[in-house]
Image (cartoon, helix red, strand yellow):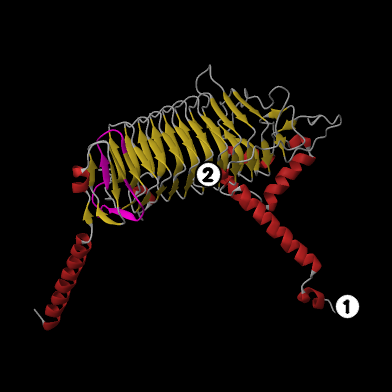
Amino acid sequence: MTRVGVLVAVVAVVMTLVVVATATASASTQTPLQPLIDAAAPGSTLVLEAGEYEGGVTVDKPLTITSTGGAIVDGHDVNSVFTITAPDVTIDNLTIRNSGDSLDREDSGVTSVDVPRVTVSNNVLENVLFGIFLRTAPDSLVVGNSVGSKDVETARKGDGIRLWECEGTVVDNNTVNGGRDLVFWFTDRIVVTNNTVTDGRYGLHFMYSDDARIEGNNLSDNSVGAFLMYSRRTHLAGNIMANNNGPSGYGIGLKDMDDVMIEHNRFIANRVGVYFDNSPWSVDSKGWIENNLFAYNRTGMLFQPSVSRNEISMNTFIDNTEQVGTTGSGNFQGNDWSVDGVGNYWSDFAGYDADSDGIGDIAYYGQDLYNSITDKHPELVFFQETPAAKAISLAAQMFPVLRPKPIFQDDNPLVERPVLTPLSTSASGTSARELVAVSFLMLAVGVVAVAFPSRRRRTANPTEVGP
């Protein structure tokens, strides 16, 4: 071996020893948590002081583990940080970090196995594969957590929150960023409220979960806001679905859903606001879409042509590139666009209201030549908003012979926008006090600007006269 080779080998050995020594020193500064759990009495509260604790622990008795602040439980990138195997366990007010990265083991920040009434509250989860994963944990609470993810490609990420057979569980006021999905499977009567989900794949993903209430959530900047499948009697109200523009890019996707109520939501700047795939599914079921805002989406509502039995009224459609579309040719009918003589507001409605009753005196027809072409040939969306596309649509307006057959008809279009229900503070992210403060600040700036015009503006025009 040459002298250079020997030197390289020595350096490598020294660096390895330094890394091992550093890791050992770091671990030695952490307090083992498992002995504290083992020593705690069932039903008691274990309060951790500020400091670092070794994770990879199992909670096998009813117990509350909390802290006064500053307690960090570190899993050292191996397996799950907390595994719960007993009912009535609470994990509260901790920083939980560094789970393993095995999708096969489903390594998590907090996981439970076949036990009811688990509470995971007010924790910060960092560098975890799955955030919170509860299996067969009915009547649980997942409240007030901040959930991050591991810095790996999307296909290797775990879900921020995953529930399996957790009926009656409440998921409230959590912030999830950068994970894969929030998944709720075989979980009836779940309540999902006031959560913020960003930079993920599916903000919410439901399967076989009946009687769910989804309210006040902000699902923005994901590939899909929410995809709901094979469930009944789902109620979505007061949610924001914005900037969901992945390959699907749905604010909400509905697949084989029965008796869904969608009301008072905001669908803004998505590829598609709401997508209907065989929903409703059962012949004796319906869907209700009322009092929602669809604004600046590529398509406000997108239907498979065979979809029917939806009642759609009192919604506001503003400047969507295509207000309503279908996924191809077919006989699209059987949906009610006016209910009890009240239709929807369309920003491109060119009719009139001679009797001033708030209802247009002519019907609104969903027909646009270029959009009808792109419905059949989606690849042509590339040319949307080009002069050629606008010329095609304009020609159809000027020459009736070129107009396509309307895909739907609203017989009672509204001529004024319906008043939208104010969003809750948690959904909007801005409190009323903050809005008032900002309003007064803007008013003060405006008064100053009017009373004291800028010197630059006054001297910019050499012809200006006067004092």
The CA distance from mark 1 to mark 2 is: 53 Å
How packed mark 1 is, by other alpha carbons closer than 10 Å (few <14, some 14-19, many 20 or more), is few
Q: Which sits in the foreground, 52 or 381?
A: 52
Residue 81 x %, y %:
27, 48
Circle 1 — which element?
A: loop
**Quadrant where the N terminus is found in the figure:** bottom left
Q: Which sits in the foreground, 260 or 131?
A: 131
How packed mark 2 is, by other alpha carbons closer than 10 Å (few <14, some 14-19, many 20 or more), is many
Using residue 269 as the reference point, say whether residue 2 is left or right of it: left
Q: What residue type is labelled 2?
A: Asn
Residue 13 is marked as none
Q: Is residue 375 magenta?
A: no
Residue 118 x %, y %:
33, 36
Question: Bounds of the magenta span?
Answer: 66-89
Q: Which sits in the foreground, 365 or 456?
A: 456
Residue at the spot of label 2:
218
Residue 50 quadrant = bottom left
Residue at the spot of label 1:
463
Using residue 197 as the reference point, say whether residue 239 is left or right of it: right
